[in-house]
Image (tube, helix red, strand yellow):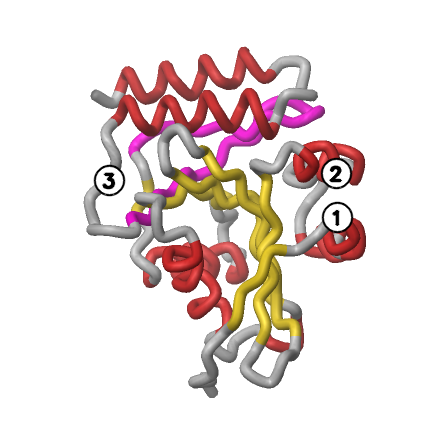
Amino acid sequence: MHIMEELTIIEGGLSDVIRFYDSIIEEFPKGERKALDVFIRLFETGDYKLLIAFSETGIEVGYAFLYTIRKLSILWLDFIVIHPEFQGKGYGSKFFDKMSSFYDSYIGMLLEVEIPEEANENQMRRISFYERMGAVRLNLKYYLPNEFGGLEMYLYYKSFNSNASPEAEVVIAAIESAYEFIHSDIRDKELWLRQTINSQDGNQ
């Protein structure tokens, strides 16, 4: 059953970042999440945003962390979560769609998606969701740098203005910015950045 309610989105504060951390631990594997102090440091820069979604009746239904790459007018979706009791009711679609109007001066959004393992229905469902929302998988090998090395993931792009993919130079600039900003504490990030960029060069 799908809901028809509208959502209200607000920017969260530091106390919200802290209270959502337990949820991050539950929802994402260790290789994809960050330590709490990293979340706090990123948030305090002013470029790492927390959006919280509420139903028409004022009930909190989910949240998302984003890096606003202002120089490129592109968002980088780091995490998005719909609380378990509201999943499967259309809130995720509405939340995802609302981000484009909330950041109406931005041209699109990049997002990392797990490469699905065989017979993993949750991962396949997540990919299907993003593709239904108009996100397109980019033709490169993207690596998420973490303390264990580099985790290969799909990188998707959702255009806010059309279905066109961004130019290769814009994608590389956004990835470089995300590596420098989000993953500044990862020692070997430059190695995995080079692997990603080289895969883009090889696909041209």
- Badge 1: residue crowd in 10 Å (few <14, some 14–19, many ≥20): few
Specify which label sits upstream in the sequence, 1 or 3.
1
Q: Are marks 3 and 2 in contact (CB under 8 Å)?
A: no
Magenta segment, which residues? 139-159
Q: Which residue is mark 1?
A: 14
Say whether residue 144 is magenta. Answer: yes
- Which residue is drawn at the image coordinates 42% and 21% (left, top)? 196
Residue type marked 2: Ile
Snapshot quadrant of residue 70: top left
Q: Residues within 10 Å of mark 2 (few under 14, many from 20)?
A: some
Task: State the predominant SS element of the stretch in magenta.
Answer: strand
Callout 1: helix, strand or loop?
Answer: helix
Amino acid type at mark 3 = Ser
User: Which mark sits nearer the N-terminus, 1 or 2?
Assistant: 1
Q: Secondary structure at mark 3?
A: loop
The residue singled out by tag 2 in the image is: 40
What amino acid type should be assigned to the residue bearing mark 1?
Leu
